[in-house]
Image (spheres, rainbow, N blue to C red):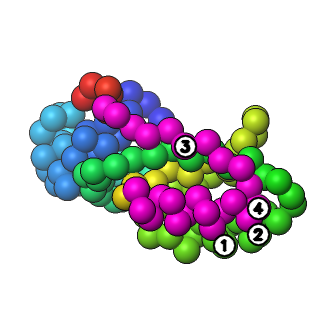
Amino acid sequence: MDQLDLTILSLLKQDSRLSNKEIGAQVHLTGQAVGQRINHLIDQQTITRFTIEIAQQQRQFIRLFMNNNHFSDVEAAVNQYSEVDSFYQVSGQACYVVIAHFEQTRLTTFIDHLSNWARYSVEVVLNDKKSN
């Protein structure tokens, strides 16, 4: 992957709806050449999916600490909730990290449900500080 690929990836991260021609105008390539590079990035699994980001009122980072070894039960329970944006098994103190957008009452239901298998820590996002 060269600097041109990194620039194309950066442009797609900002706006995945850009056409190959629009990207090409910014990186001084034809739309066809950009398309070939994007297809190569897909083939290499550098790009694994195209998606959108939905603005959510709430965002939580929930760390789960297992009380027992019922990992499949926890995984099945977490995957039942449409509010879960990402769900990772991690190393370190926690066993899992859940990134979600629960409203308060649903968050309480979620936590109560998972309390059968795990302790938890919930961090609520106050402000997004990433600059574009």
**Residue 62, percent across and down?**
56, 47
How many C-alpha atoms fall within 10 Å of the one at disc 3: few (<14), some, or many (≥20)?
Answer: some
**Quadrant housing residue 103:** bottom left
Q: Secondary structure at mark 1?
A: helix
The CA span between labels 1 and 2 is: 6 Å
Q: Tell me which residue sits at (61%, 42%) in the image.
A: 121
**Residue 59, percent across and down?**
39, 47
The CA span between labels 4 and 1 is: 12 Å
**Residue 104, percent across and down?**
40, 56
Mark 1 = which residue? 76
Q: Earlier in the sequence, mark 2 or mark 3?
A: 2
Mark 4 = which residue? 117
Q: Earlier in the sequence, mark 1 or mark 3?
A: 1
| Residue 112 within the magenta-colored segment of the rendering | yes
Amino acid on which disc 1 is placed: Ala
Q: Tell me which residue sits at (13%, 46%) in the image.
A: 22
> What is the span of residues highlighted in magenta in the rendered image?
104-127
Mark 2 = which residue? 72
Amino acid on which disc 2 is placed: Ser
- 60, 25: nearer the viewer: 60
Q: Secondary structure at mark 2?
A: helix
